[in-house]
Image: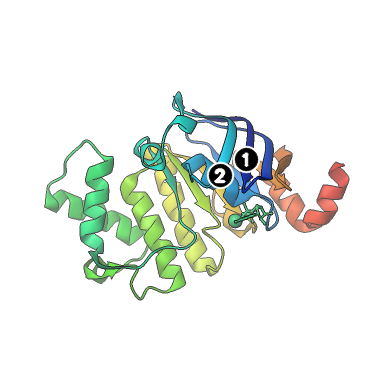
Amino acid sequence: MFKIKNLEVSLNKKNILNKIDLSIKKNETHVLIGQNGAGKSTLAQSIMGNPNYLVKGEIIFDSHDLLKLDPQQRAGLGIFLSFQQVLEIPGVKIYDYLRLLYKKSHEQRLTPLKFKAFLKEKMDLLNFDAEFLTRYLNCGFSGGEKKKMEILQMLVLEPKLIILDEIDSGLDIDAIETVAKAINFLKKEKQSSILLITHYSRILNFIDINQVHLLDKGKIMANGDASLAKQIESQGFAAFLKEQI
Ligand code: ADP
Ligand code: MG
């Protein structure tokens, strides 16, 4: 369903990713771990189509060649990437924004009443108070609230492929559990596929993982199941990588 083959990515003529192969099937959850600077965000941005990167190789999603599509078209296919730095947009009310997102991403039309019920289920999942809906997008939000807002958008979009780039960094354990709940909801209800980028393993205690990939200096150095993340965490990146060579 999602397949990366022999991917090479460079930025300003500097080579960042090399020979990346990765396949994610429908309803699978994969974790990408690696130290700062390993190239994790570069991979996420390349999948989404950030035009700053020069990308060679293949990225196929639902038999579409993503490298031929712009970021909007990729989003239109049902791919979602969470932002690390979100924008505050004064003047745009959250309710109106989410209603628009829903309309753009679903063929099915919901009456305002049905949409409100749809939204309430998602807000409850994230412990968001209804009062938030009348606020302006991200304006005056705390760091944790901004991240939850990203997750609320994800729940409204119901993406087929979800890429979360360090969504757990800076969150306390309760917020991490809440984010995990939202991920598990879409896994169960929509059979979404997930690529979870993280450098902590705490969030993995709340989500079932199919595969873990370790990225280092732009290359995938190890693949395994959930136990790989635990092993790397207990040994530390450096010691683990030494053993791989
Ligand atoms: P990660 O998300 O794993 O921390 P990144 O994908 O952000 O890693 O970065 C991968 C590499 O790309 C790093 O070596 C980083 O220094 C380099 N890099 C990121 N942005 C730029 C830039 N604007 N110009 C040059 N190199 C960059
Ligand atoms: Mg990063």
Q: Would you identify the image quadrant in which residue 80 lies? A: top left
Q: In this orientation, which residue lies closer to the viewer: 144 or 63?
A: 63
Q: Is residue 62 above or below residue 117?
A: above
- Quick one: label 1, few (<14), some, or many (20+) residues within 10 Å? many
Q: Residue 9, which numbered label?
A: 1
Residue type marked 1 = Val
Q: In this orientation, which residue lies closer to the viewer: 77 or 72?
A: 72
Q: In this orientation, which residue lies closer to the viewer: 245 or 43?
A: 43
Question: Is 94 left, or right, of 161 in this rendering?
Answer: left
Picture coordinates of residue 125, whole percent (x, y): 36, 58
- Residue 208 visible within the image: no
Picture coordinates of residue 102, whole percent (x, y): 25, 47
Of callouts 2 and 1, the N-terminal one: 1
Label 1 residue SS = strand
Q: Residue 214, which numbered label?
A: none
Question: Is 124 left, or right, of 113 in this rendering?
Answer: right
Which residue does the image show at 65% across and 57% down from the upper left? 199
Real-space Cα distance between discs 2 and 1? 7 Å
Residue type marked 2 = Tyr
Q: Are marks 2 and 1 in contact (CB under 8 Å)?
A: yes
Q: How is the image coloured?
A: rainbow
- Quick one: label 2, few (<14), some, or many (20+) residues within 10 Å? many
Picture coordinates of residue 10, whole percent (x, y): 63, 43
Which residue does the image show at 74% across and 48% down from the upper left? 217
Q: Is residue 53 above or below residue 166?
A: above
- Identify the residue under disc 2: 53
Q: Is residue 66 above or below residue 231?
A: above
Q: In this orientation, which residue lies closer to the viewer: 237 or 5?
A: 5
